Amino acid sequence: MIKIKLPDGTILEFEPGVTVKDIASRIAKSLEKNAVGAFFNGELIDVHTPITTDGEIKIITAKDDESLEILRHSAAHVLAKAVKRAFGEDNVKLGIGPATQEGFYYDFDLSEAISEEDLEKIEKEMQKIIENKEPFVREEVTREKAQELFKDDPYKLELLADIPEGEKITIYWLGNDFYDLCRGPHVEHAGMIKAFKLLSVAGAYWRGDSKNKMLQRIYGTAFWKKKELEEYLHRLEEAKKRDHRILGKQLDLFSIYEEAGPGLVFWHPNGAILRQEIENWVEEEHRKRGYQRIYTPHIMKADLWKTSGHYNFYRENMFFVPVVEHDEEERLGNEEVPLTCEEIERANWYAVKPMNCPGHILIYKSKVRSYRDLPVRFFEFGTVYRYEKSGSLHGLLRVRGFTQDDGHIFCRPDQLKEEIQGVLDYVMEMLNTFNLDYVINIGTKPDKYIGSDEAWEHATQALIDALKERGFEYNIVEGDGAFYGPKMDIAVLDAIGRKWDGPTIQVDFNLPERFDLTYVDKDGQKKRPVMVHRAIMGSIERFIGLLIEHYAGLFPVWLAPVQVVIIPVSDKYLEYADEVYERLKKAGVRVQLDDESAKVGYKIRKAETMKIPYMLVVGEKEQQSGTVSVRSKKEGDLGAMDVDAFVSKILKEIKEKSN
């Protein structure tokens, strides 16, 4: 007999080979009916996988979030079978088809291009499979049988070769005429897929490597209920309207030029104003909180990154350059005399910084620190560079060069909790300023890490204690810490509920050890400080991308690149319009005068397209009364208003940072 432990601690005994269905039946008939899978000893399995050893089980129903992975993985197999039916069994080679956080996809190799119009045809084939309730059946096979089954499918053979000797090899049948190399799990039959939608087609290199063949990837999503699918599709439509790449072009905020390099952002004047306003606020808030502004170089010797551990743990994401000492007259700028192998071998290797931490550490080490000096809080707008595969780059959200509002706190161990809470207070101030919701996650020790287990435990507990004392809810994400310490990540929620990477707080006992950081304690002995890595917004680029989508391009007045546009109804009122323009400009308002010889309606539509918060229309009536006709992008027509009254109104909004 084997022993199965339930979540409430109850232990049940079964014959080896028992399934999730059997266990659910013992607990309750309703659970047997609703079970779609289970976690057994932490591994996700389906309801018919035989269990042969003792272990802990958590049975999953459609009410559990984890059930969506099973549903969507199953939908991916239905998609694969439907594509084979639609384009011909022998014309399609299958790549991979996993579930994702938002849905699923499958990669296909076929000579015929799949178009957006083909998705409806494929959906109809999927619907036939679903209506027939074709069953998913798991089968363990030998390596030899698997090689025979997939002898005509090079991608499956490659995946098969990656499975270690001795590990189980499983295939899943869908009906009696389709099978796929797969660990599972899947639902019992295709009829359980009640609500699905194919979304788009894109190119994807096999296994994400640009050296491999480009396959065709079909994206889709699936939910247990049609209402949930409809809500998701509505959010997608909202997301399209808010796409920061489209709005960035429409509002003339930024560009990324292939000739300059992928993932490198160029800020246009409008975008520079937006960024400067955010940075001014960040600068002021840091000063209030006792931070000292510093600057560090963009490039530093590779040996420094070996000391920090980045060279060993982060090397594949770093840019390295050789710096060769040579006779300036003979070699500098001489393209006809390339560097020799010998020169490259004796070059001093430098790294373009992917992080700011080592630079801050060196400044801390620049003089002897007393316990009275601590905490020391350094801050910089540090521009860093990290290698990302070109296929993963995405507007402002995933780039190769970006700026962090990066800070590091060096403190005594007894100050640690208070410093973490101080950063938390700052984070909450930031979230409130931009009207953002959040979710807090604690990332614990990853598989590859530096430092002692004791230091990791101490650092992790400090983060948890700081949250508990402030009454914050949080989730533990096992293995998600940085290689040098645990981290608190605050995921930011935008206006339509999407999660974005945001603030982070990381406790580090290890880099102070590696760099031999010390302070002189009150007993005259040298002690080791604790280091807190923290960023309030994280990447400024990504944060602005978030704000563009959160506000759908209609920024609060204090952030708007152009806060007011003055629109004269005809050229006769240009002189008065210019007078109003000068009064607003003198008050510090970012204002434009639209003196184009065009109809008022056209000018208004142009201002609305640029999402300018206020339009001041002036004509004969306004000129005679010394007023302006105010139109708000958010509130509509506000009627006539004295110029000074409008100036007071908008300056109040700017000062209060109204959303």
Image (cartoon, rainbow, N blue to C red):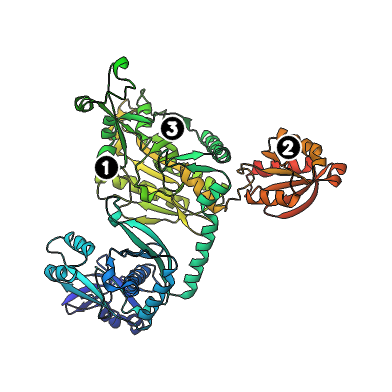
* Amino acid, disc 3: Phe
Which class describes the residues within 10 Å of circle 2: few (<14), some (14-19), or many (20+)? many
Identify residue for label 1.
313
Q: Is residue 541 above or below residue 74?
A: above
**Of the numbered discs in the image, which one, if any, rests on residue 584?**
2
Q: Residue at x 36, y 69 (%)?
A: 72
The percent position of residue 548, horizontal first and vertical second, equals 54, 49
Return the residue at label 3: 378
Q: Report, in whole angstroms, how far the alpha carbon at label 3 lies from the one at label 2.
A: 38 Å
Which residue type does callout 1 highlight? Phe
Q: Which of 209/470 is in front?
A: 209
Q: Position of residue 437 (x, y in %)?
A: 51, 54
The spot of residue 556 in percent (x, y) is 62, 47
Q: Quadrant of the N terminus?
A: bottom left
For the point 58% across and 40% down, the residue is 270
Amino acid type at circle 2 is Leu
Q: Earlier in the sequence, mark 3 or mark 2?
A: 3
Left or right of 570: which side holds 265? left
Q: Nearer the viewer, mark 2 or mark 1?
A: 2
150 or 317, which lies in front?
150
Mark 1 to mark 3: distance in Å? 25 Å
Secondary structure at numbered mark 1: helix
Question: Which residue is depicted at the point 70% across and 43% down?
Answer: 565
- Mark 1, other Cα within 10 Å: few <14 / some 14–19 / many ≥20: some
Characterize the local packing of mark 3: few (<14), some (14-19) or many (20 or more) Cα atoms within 10 angstroms: many
